[in-house]
Amino acid sequence: MMKRAFLLSAVVTLLPTLGAGATINIQFDYTYDSQGFFTTHPEAKATLELAGHTLTDRFRDTLTAIVPSGQNDWTAQPFDPGGDGQLSISNPTIPANTILVYAGGHVLGGSTLGIGGPGGYGASGFQDWFDTLGARGQSGALNSPATDNGPWGGSITFDTTTNWSFALGTKPASSAQSDFYSVATHELAHLLGFGTADSFSARISNGIFSGPASGSVAVSPDQGHWATGTKGTVGTVQQDAVMTPSITTGTRKRFSSIDWAGMSDLGWQLARFGDANADGSVDFNDLVALAQNYNVIDGQRRWAQGDFDFDGNVDFNDLVRLAQNYNSTEAAGINAAALGGEGFASDWRAAQALAASSVPEPGGLCAIALAAVGCLSRRRR
């Protein structure tokens, strides 16, 4: 098996000048795909969109809109996804709760599969405008040291010479192919702050990342990844974390418990298990979302569709997670990692216990949930 390397973007030049629960949307822009990667591989767009939803469906943050006007203007400065160098894009408007991502492909060289990172910017105007550009309403992003992250967006690019698999729900059919979904998820996480945000680097000391969700985790020498060999949990199975520096060809890596923990610790507010619509409450609306996808085992399901253990399927394990939090409410702005028992650093032990036990007879809330699933299923026929 051959291993290929990831590379996080080194083009992260922030240039400040002159002194409840909202679903986050990634808006992909292919304008600067000058090499035609997504024209040659149109199926890659759907896979990239799925990777975006994998990450953002669970976010509960509220990001302020970026709307230049009057003396407040700005220039977005992401790296060029279709070539070398940096773009200079005048005064893009970015709606609230939207992250703008310029996507493309070109020859990256060596074993690099993809590059992703947040974009820099230049600006003029008033202080509240600078704060909006630098933090998007996430006040902790302005702290020193930073405790949160509010990017406007950035760029992501993929190697055009790689033998890609663009499969949505399964690993590559050939051991010679690299999994586009895995790489896209990895690079988008960099763009969203993993290994690139000030709030991430502020938690690293002597090669160890420390946070309430992650515990203590060794990082790679570049301090932008988990150390090689770091494990996380997906469903009831341990796997190499997505945010380690490389992936073996022919394999798929899904975002795991330890990857989510890192996103939590750098500042993203994560919906608790069962909260499919990320509104802070686990209620009948979430149960409906799960019921509509129950027993869909295609590897393409998302958090918003009831996949609460990140394995791409909606099954009994997801129903159990919803039932355990049913009729609970989480206050706005409270990170799920701070609530205890939310499945971050201790998720692997909980998964082992679940896997080791026989499937329990549903009782209490779980029985109610199962009945509702059956009822909803019959209504759809």
Image: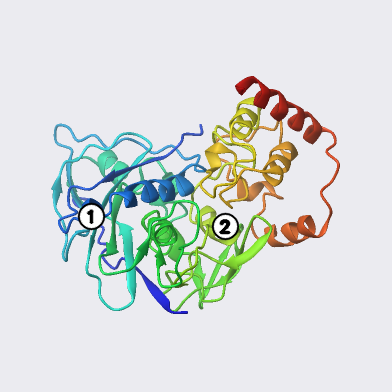
Q: Is residue 295 left or right of residue 55?
A: right
Q: Is residue 128 left or right of residue 146?
A: left
State the SS at label 2: helix
| Residue at the image position 15 percent from the left and 56 percent from the top | 34
Choose the circle earlier in sequence order: 2 or 1: 1
| Residue at the image position 72 percent from the left and 28 percent from the top | 374
Q: Quadrant of residue 196?
A: bottom left
Q: Is residue 150 something that shows in the picture?
A: no
Q: Do labels 2 and 1 touch, CB within 8 Å?
A: no
| Residue at the image position 31 percent from the left and 64 percent from the top | 115
Q: Is residue 168 something that shows in the picture?
A: yes
Residue type, label 2: Ala
Residue that mark 2 sits on: 261
Residue 40 is tagged as: 1
Q: Quadrant of residue 129?
A: top left
Within-10-Å neighbours for mark 2: few <14, some 14–19, many 20+: many
Which residue is more in the foreground, 56 or 176? 176
